[in-house]
Image (spheres, rainbow, N blue to C red):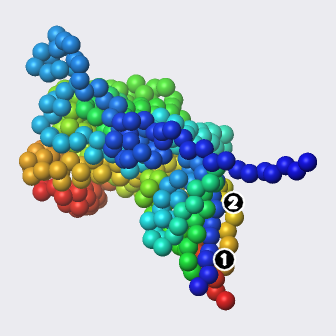
Amino acid sequence: MQIDLRTVSIKPVRQTFDHIARRFGDKPASRYQEGTYDLQQTDIFHYRPLWDPEHVLFDQKRTQVVMKDWYALKDPRQYYYGSYTIARARQQDAAESNFDMVEERGLVDTVPSNLKQIALALLVPLRHVEWGGNMNNSYISAYGYGTAITQPCLYHAMDHLGIAQYLTRIGLVLGGPEALDTAKDAWMNDPRWQEMRRLVEDVLVTQDWFELFVAQNLVLEGLYHPMFFDRLDDQFTANGATAISMMTRFMTEWYAESSKWVDAQIKVAAAESAANKEIISGWVQKYRDRAVKALAPLAEVAFGDQAGAVMGDVVADFNSRCAKLGLAI
Amino acid sequence: MSTVFIAFQANEESRPIIEAVLADNPHAVLHESPAMVKIDAEGKLVIKRESIEERIGRDFDLQELQINLITISGHLDEDDDEFTLAWKN
């Protein structure tokens, strides 16, 4: 008896979901596409919410920015739940081992005391700003429109919570539990922090979710992250406080990654129409000027005589970034 | 001219790689078999890191190709940016 082996090719009846096939054609779709596109509920809202009878439950009119297709705001990192959690878990492991190293070897004792004071005075109260970032991005994912942008905003919110926790741990490592109370007191009462606190609190109550996105993710982060986690970090490293740089490594990495996503959103939204470009540019100007004012006294703590020059550099970098995104500022 | 080819396991990870290869090599021909795809190309086939990165949205090391690679034919010229198959004789 003779047996012939042969392969039989079985064509799947369908390659992906119908709504994905309508967008991209009937071919195998990536998990990001399947977990993102057209998931936002668009129809059959029976009742208007009592707390906002002007709008339906999910409404495109909750922002002044107008997009023909909100799914044009896609995430270049292609984060869906799986890829996001895997990426962050890996970074979390690295951060944990950095903290372990600092704690086990007692590296904090090698940090010069003036730099330790700067870290305690700036990085620890900054956790309240990060918490604002968490709230704002949660708001965007609740009231925004289109899964393409609301999904990564929720991840962004969790990232901010993570950063706030790392900053808290830095406070604990450097100064023990009292450091957190001192930082809270500085946040509430120190005149140098009040401008920043006012800005964060004003942003917290902003209703237009895209305005919030511009204020929080583009302007605020675009100015204070480079200042604290790039310029100040360079100063720590150059003067023997590498231990602090080890503990803020996640923030530096995270900003490089997430700012690419923010850039992609702004670029697409501003390119959609002249009206969008004008609105977004206006928001950038409004919040940039306030953020610069709020950061000025903090830059003085960090850089002393160099504060003006460093601020100037950071703002110039930010302006050229905005110009690249097609904004008129 | 003779043909070079490369074959990958057909899965979620190799899909963007295959898309990138077909976009960069318009003369390449795709053969889909069960659980495997084979790409034939006359003369030369180039795989570019940049075009794969564009599709997957993260940094890519060309050596990650090996995970889903089944077989290749041709002389291989590999550096950080490109993975090139060609018959050099």
Vertical order, B67 against A207 (above or below)? below
Q: Position of residue A175 (x, y in %)?
A: 49, 33
Label 2 Cα crowd, 10 Å radius (few <14 / some 14-19 / many 20+): some
Residue beneath the point at 20% across and 48% down: A269
Residue at the spot of label 2:
B70
Quick one: quadrant of the N terminus of chain B?
A: bottom right
The x and y percentages for residue A279 are 10, 45
Q: Residue furthest bottom?
A: B89
Q: Residue at x 56, y 44 (%)?
A: A11
Q: Secondary structure at mark 1?
A: loop
The residue under the point 51% across, 38% down is: A13
Measuring from the top left, give residue A173's x and y in whole percent. Answer: 53, 35
Residue A177 visible in the picture: yes
Q: Residue at x 46, y 26 (%)?
A: A178
| The one of A246 and A84 positioned closer to us in this rendering | A84
According to the picture, the residue beneath numbered tag 1 turns out to be: B74
Question: Looking at numbered disc 2 in the image, what kind of residue is underneath it?
Answer: Ile
Going by the picture, which residue comes out furthest to the right?
A: A1
Marker disc for residue A211? none
The residue marked by circle 2 belongs to what chain?
B
Marks 2/1: CA–CA distance: 14 Å
Circle 1 residues within 10 Å: few <14, some 14–19, many ≥20: some
Q: For residue B42, which quarter of the picture? A: bottom right
Kind of residue sitting beneath label 1 = Gly
Rendered-image quadrant of the C terminus of chain B = bottom right
Secondary element under disc 2, as helix, strand or loop, is strand
- Picture coordinates of residue A293 (x, y %)? 17, 45
Name the foreground residue: A268 vs A180.
A268
Position of A328 with respect to A14 (left or right) is left
